[in-house]
Image: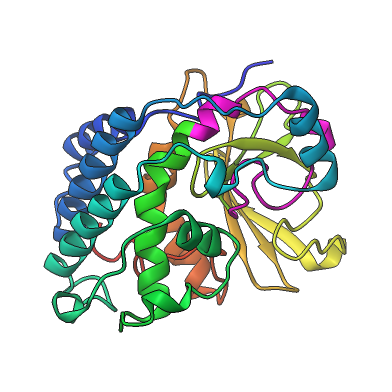
């Protein structure tokens, strides 16, 4: 079965975005920001590499069957001092582009927390950041956005490490089996049109039901729908129960390999259209209208 190279490295995504922008004549302040963001993440991803997971086959299967995500932050080999330096670099970057990134206008006056395994695990589980970081005055969404983009290059390595190690048919949940994050993209495979979700943080892909909302598990067909573009290549799935949407690409419509990380970025106009219809993405967005400046 043909599947795309979901776990494309950030370097490949960066190169693809540069080529796409050149061909499409896209140039904007938001685009400049995104290039710098990917450059920082690519460096962190390259330095961290693909780690040894240390998780045996029996324990891995137990966690999958129990619905427990494979990553526990205290079990990782992440260099938290280095992660904190990436967090600070990204905070400075977001502050430099605060004119297009709401919530980061006063970031230069904020006492930023040091990133630890405890803080990272709290963020992954959607909990309040531990009390020793309450000195920060960042809005919760701004802090969550920085945490997401800080941890992404480190977790992508773990996504690669666990690739093909778990049984796709044993998971079928709406959140990532590796890190627990929500999907930000999806695709229909080339062979049967089966739907796979793609993690918003570690880039892991996993098999999921076609007629099921991954965010609220609504399976009532009258409350589920999708729209396609004129070519039929792209879809946007909608749930009327939770009002979330999810973008998808139909691989049955393409002849060559595609970079899903790049597709997620260059389909920003689909985000805009969905949001104009009153739907929201389950992941934290950089901008209310991600295509307004791209």
For residue 142, side relative to residue 226 (left or right): left
Q: Which residue occupies the foreground of this view, 291 or 117?
A: 117
Q: Is residue 177 magenta?
A: yes
Q: Is residue 283 above or below residue 127?
A: above
Q: Which residue occupies the foreground of this view, 226 or 153?
A: 153
Give the residue at x 15% y 52%: 32
For residue 35, side relative to residue 214 (left or right): left
Residue 82 lies, in percent from the top left, at 27, 45
Q: Is residue 247 above or below residue 283?
A: above
Residue 242 lies, in percent from the top left, at 70, 73
Q: Which residue occupies the foreground of this view, 28 or 207?
A: 207
Residue found at the very far right of the displayed protein: 220
Give the residue at x 49% y 48%: 201
Give the residue at x 32% y 79%: 138
Residue 275 lies, in percent from the top left, at 49, 71
Dominant secondary structure of the magenta stretch?
Answer: loop
Give the residue at x 73% y 28%: 166
Q: State the extent of the magenta-drawn residues as a range.
A: 158-182
For residue 221, side relative to residue 137 (left or right): right
Q: Quadrant of the C terminus?
A: bottom left
């Amino acid at each position: 079965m043909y599947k795309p190279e979901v776990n494309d490295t950030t370097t490949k995504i960066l190169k693809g975005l540069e080529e796409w922008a050149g061909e499409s004549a896209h140039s904007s302040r938001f685009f400049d920001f995104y290039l710098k963001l990917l450059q920082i993440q690519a460096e962190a991803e390259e330095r961290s590499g693909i780690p040894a997971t240390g998780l045996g086959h029996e324990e891995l299967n137990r966690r999958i069957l129990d619905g427990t995500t494979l990553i526990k932050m205290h079990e990782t080999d992440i260099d938290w001092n280095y992660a904190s330096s990436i967090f600070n670099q990204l905070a400075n970057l977001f502050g430099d582009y605060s004119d297009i990134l709401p919530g980061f206008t006063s970031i230069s006056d904020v006492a930023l927390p040091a990133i630890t395994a405890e803080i990272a695990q709290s963020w992954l589980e959607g909990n309040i950041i531990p009390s020793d970081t309450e000195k920060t005055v960042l809005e919760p969404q701004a802090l969550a956005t920085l945490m997401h983009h800080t941890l992404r290059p480190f977790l992508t390595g773990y996504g690669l490490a666990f690739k093909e190690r778990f049984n796709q048919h044993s998971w079928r949940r709406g959140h990532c089996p590796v890190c627990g994050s929500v999907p930000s993209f999806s695709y229909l495979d080339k062979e049967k049109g089966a739907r796979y979700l793609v993690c918003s943080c570690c880039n892991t892909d996993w098999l999921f039901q076609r007629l099921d909302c991954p965010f609220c598990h609504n399976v009532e067909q009258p409350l589920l729908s999708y729209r396609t573009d004129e070519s039929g290549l792209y879809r946007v799935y909608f749930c009327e129960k939770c009002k979330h949407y999810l973008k998808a690409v139909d691989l049955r419509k393409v002849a060559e390999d595609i970079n899903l990380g790049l597709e997620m970025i260059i389909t920003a106009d689909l985000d805009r259209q969905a949001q104009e219809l009153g739907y929201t993405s389950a992941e934290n967005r950089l901008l209310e209208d991600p295509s307004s400046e791209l």
